[in-house]
Amino acid sequence: MSGEDQNTTSHSPDDWPTSALPDGFMAELGRTVATFGWLEDNLKRAIFALTATRPQERITDGMLRDWIRQMNDIADDSLSTLIDQFDAQMRGNPAAGADPQLIKDLRAQKDFRNLICHSAWTEAGDGRFRPDFIDNRGDKYDGTLGVEDFIRMRAEVAKSGESVIAIIAATGVSLPGRTGRSLSSN
């Protein structure tokens, strides 16, 4: 085999393998994935706030980083595990109270996040795209998604994230970072 035959991507487009998908679709997909990253960050902060024992103490970035290192069981956890941890901590903290609807919403959003993050995409026509994904239960997603689905989900995730931020605020723990800034106020 020649060197050219071994390197099959050398003649591929710069954005391969996503180059066949429209830029607008990719931008909305990326924004949606980033919104989930923001939610995960705030869930970690909420778990910290709900487990903090000194709510009057001003928490620094360094203290938060040290705590995350010590609590490595959540630092790299999946969104599913973060939701479980958040739910457990919320139930155990009277300042936060339990919010079954928020947890239900977060779980549904987690399923959408897994779908969009772990799929291979193909065009389905009419501005719709087919995610090729089989979840850990063996279920295959048979529908299509469009930009409007990403926009709708971002709004839902932002609403859930704002609820998480409100719970952080209710604990009285002051956390560094952008948790106090609403996505919808941009």
Image (cartoon, rainbow, N blue to C red):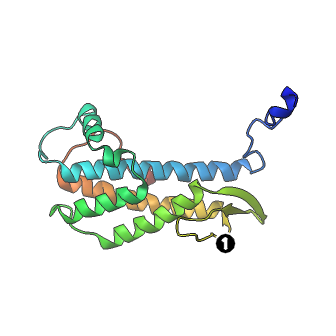
From the viewer's side, name the closer residue of 161 and 103.
103
Is residue 50 shown left or right of residue 146? left
Is 94 placed above or below 118 here? below
Question: Could you tell me the amino acid type at mark 1?
Answer: Asp
Answer with the quarter of the image where residue 159 lies.
bottom left
Q: State the image coordinates of residue 72 (x, y, percent, origin top left).
A: 32, 43
- Name the quarter where the N terminus is drawn: top right
From the viewer's side, name the closer residue of 89 and 57.
89
Q: Which residue is mark 1?
A: 142
In this view, which residue lies farthest toward the top?
Answer: 3
Is residue 151 shown left or right of residue 21? left
Which element carries disc 1, helix, strand or loop? loop
Residue density around tag 1, few if under 14, some if 14–19, many if 20 or more, within 10 Å: few
From the viewer's side, name the closer residue of 45 and 159.
45
**Residue 152 showing in the rendered view:** yes
Count of number-bearing discs: 1
Is 176 placed above or below 183 here? above
Identified at 37% across, 57% down, the residue is: 81
Q: State the image coordinates of residue 130 (x, y, percent, origin top left).
A: 70, 63
Is 7 placed above or below 93 here? above
Answer with the quarter of the image where residue 66 lies.
top left
Is residue 169 shown left or right of residue 155? left
Is residue 14 shown left or right of residue 11? left
**Residue 179 showing in the rendered view:** no
Q: State the image coordinates of residue 71 (x, y, percent, origin top left).
A: 27, 44
